[in-house]
Amino acid sequence: MPKPLFDELVHEPSRLQICGLLAPVVEARFATVREETGLTDSALSKHLKALEAAGYLEVRKERAGARTATIVGLTEDGRHAFCGHMAALQRLAGVASLRDRRPSSRRRVLIERSVRGHS
């Protein structure tokens, strides 16, 4: 299980969706990612370049007859960043959960420290 780590680059909604689509697969065609996300070619290219520049994504060209297809896939660093980001979001969701409205003693301490720190 990756360590929960909030990643602002991954958190951007379109990039979060892209990473979510790519996480369970080895790679996908640009056209498939475009169709699944509903992004335009230019918007998708911009987000893919940002992920690639961070080392989170690999982009390659594949020739199929007269056509060339763009293939994208998360790198190990990208998969780790996405999984860590999701773990951080899940941790935040657990803290914010309304299932148990009574604050635990740990939450009460954190709230008290927070209030004291801002007084």
Image: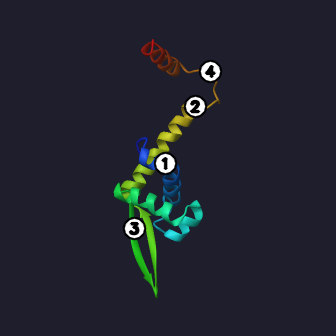
State how far apart marks 1 and 4 are (Cα).
Answer: 33 Å
Q: Is residue 21 above or below residue 97?
A: below
Image location of residue 108, percent across then percent down? 52, 17
Camera sees residue 75? no
Image location of residue 83, percent across then percent down? 45, 49
Q: Is residue 4 above or below residue 98?
A: below
The answer to the question of whether label 4 and label 2 lie on touching residues, with beta carbons closer than 8 A, is no
Q: Nearer the viewer, residue 86 or 50?
A: 50
> At x 56% / y 34%, what residue is drawn?
94
- The residue singled out by tag 3 in the image is 59
Mark 4 neighbour class, 10 Å CA radius: few under 14, some 14 to 19, many 20 or more? few
Question: Helix, strand, or loop for circle 2?
Answer: helix
**Foreground: disc 2 or disc 3:** 3
Q: Is tag 1's residue or tag 4's residue first in the polypeptide sequence?
A: 1
The answer to the question of whether label 2 and label 1 lie on touching residues, with beta carbons closer than 8 A, is no
> At x 53% / y 70%, what residue is drawn?
31
